[in-house]
Amino acid sequence: MGTALATHCCASEEEDKPEALKNLKKDVAFVSVSLDKQPLTESLQGNWYRQCDSKHVGEICGSSLFWNPQWGLTDVSSPLSEGSSGLLVVQMEDETRYATVTTKPQTAIMWADGDVWIRK
């Protein structure tokens, strides 16, 4: 749960306001809102490198992975999504690949084939 500060109430008429807001000052209202968990792909934005040799893999932007041309892949980008149990899922040239994401000591993407990517 978080708290947001609103400077104006959305209701146009006093009678349209919820009962709890009727007694507050007209210029300030505190509203409690639920903050949803950040989607996995949003927390992974940026450039990624292989941990074993520091080669640039590509850049995650939005819900896509844009591959570095050095890999010679047919597709310039691959869609990313969050699968069951928080797994990262990438659709890559007719194949689906899965990874887990760790955040300590540094954020890393650990692929099922043993490859590990880190953000720099």
Image: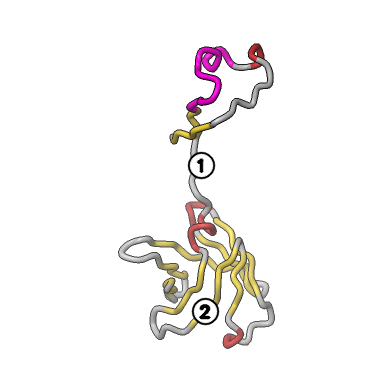
Instruction: Give residue 13's quadrant in the image.
Output: top right
Residue beneath the point at 55% across and 72% down: 59
SS label for mark 2: strand
**Span colored in magenta:** 18-30
SS label for mark 1: loop
Q: For label 1, count other residues whose C-alpha is less than 10 Å away and answer few (under 14), some (14-19) or many (20+).
A: few
- The answer to whether residue 103 is left or right of residue 91 is left
Q: Which of marks 2 and 1 is nearer the N terminus?
A: 1
Residue beneath the point at 42% across and 72% down: 118
Examine the rendered structure and indicate whether residue 55 appears above or below residue 84: below
Location of mark 1 (residue): 36
Residue beneath the point at 31% across and 64% down: 105
Q: Quadrant of the N terminus?
A: top left
Location of mark 2 (residue): 57
Examine the rendered structure and indicate whether residue 16 appears above or below residue 67: above
Callout 2, which amino acid?
Answer: Val
Q: Quadrant of the C terminus?
A: bottom left
* Residue 22 inside the magenta-drawn segment: yes
| Residue 106: % across, % down | 35, 66
